[in-house]
Image (cartoon, rainbow, N blue to C red):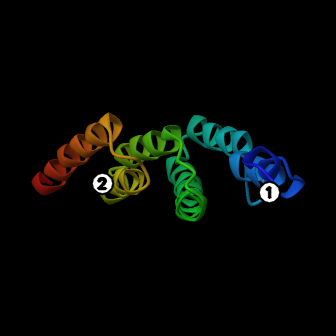
């Protein structure tokens, strides 16, 4: 059996589709819509909780199957954390993303952003 036949089994297709689109039975777009609604309603703490829980689950999935954490979740979470002056959470988002990315230019840019955030934390 070649790699295409292995990939083409029902279990492989189902688990890959599930891993790419859903977390705990909710589609990624459902979470995004919920976060957007909370932001529009100025409930930044609620939005931050949802984003953090999604990123935590994506980090576990990344450890298990190597799926990357989409940058939208990290940047949105970090921006909201900064808006509510939660710099520890902002650093957590950057650290989580760095730990689950391949070495490259994106990693260097996030590492630089993380250093800037740490300097800001040190001055507060």
The local crowd at label 1, few if under 14, some if 14 to 19, many if 20 or more residues have their Cα within 10 Å, is few
Question: Label for residue 25?
Answer: 1
Q: Residue at x 71, y 39 (%)?
A: 29
* Along the viewing direction, whichever of 71 and 85 lies nearer the viewer: 71
Quarter of the image where the C terminus is located = bottom left
Residue lying at 44% horizontally and 54% vertically, measured from the top left? 100
- The residue at the far front in this view is 1
> Where residue 123 sits in the image (x, y, percent)?
10, 52
Q: Residues within 10 Å of mark 2 (few under 14, many from 20)?
A: many
In the displayed structure image, the side of residue 77 where residue 23 appears, left or right: right
Instruction: Tell me the CA gap for discs 1 and 2.
Output: 31 Å
Q: Which mark is residue 2?
A: none
Q: Nearer the viewer, residue 14 or 83?
A: 14
Q: Is residue 11 left or right of residue 103?
A: right
| Mark nearer the N terminus (1 vs 2) | 1
Residue reaching furthest to the left: 123
Q: Position of residue 28 (x, y in %)?
A: 69, 44
Provide residue 101's location: percent of width, then percent of height: 42, 48
The residue lying toward the viewer, choosing from 32 and 123, is 32
In the rendered image, residue 110, in percent from the top left (x then y), is placed at 30, 42
Q: Secondary structure at mark 1?
A: loop
**Residue occupying the point 77% across, 44% down:** 4
Would you say the residues marked 1 and 2 are in contact, meaning their CB atoms lie under 8 Å apart? Answer: no
Secondary structure of residue under mark 2: helix
Depth-wise, is mark 1 or mark 2 nearer the camera?
1
Q: Is residue 104 above or below residue 56?
A: above
Could you tell me how many numbered marks the image carries?
A: 2
User: Quadrant of residue 36 in the image?
Assistant: top right
Q: Which residue is mark 2?
A: 87
């Amino acid at each position: 059996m070649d790699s295409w036949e292995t990939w083409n089994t029902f279990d492989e297709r189902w688990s890959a589709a599930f891993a790419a689109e859903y977390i705990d039975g909710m589609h990624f777009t459902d979470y995004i819509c919920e976060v957007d609604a909370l932001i529009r309603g100025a409930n930044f703490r609620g939005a931050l909780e949802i984003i953090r829980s999604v990123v935590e689950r994506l980090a576990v999935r990344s450890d298990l199957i190597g799926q990357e954490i989409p940058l939208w979740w990290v940047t949105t979470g970090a921006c909201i954390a900064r808006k509510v002056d939660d710099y520890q959470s902002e650093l957590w988002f950057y650290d989580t993303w760095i730990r689950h990315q391949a070495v490259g230019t994106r990693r260097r840019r996030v590492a630089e952003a993380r250093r800037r955030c740490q300097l800001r934390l040190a001055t507060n």
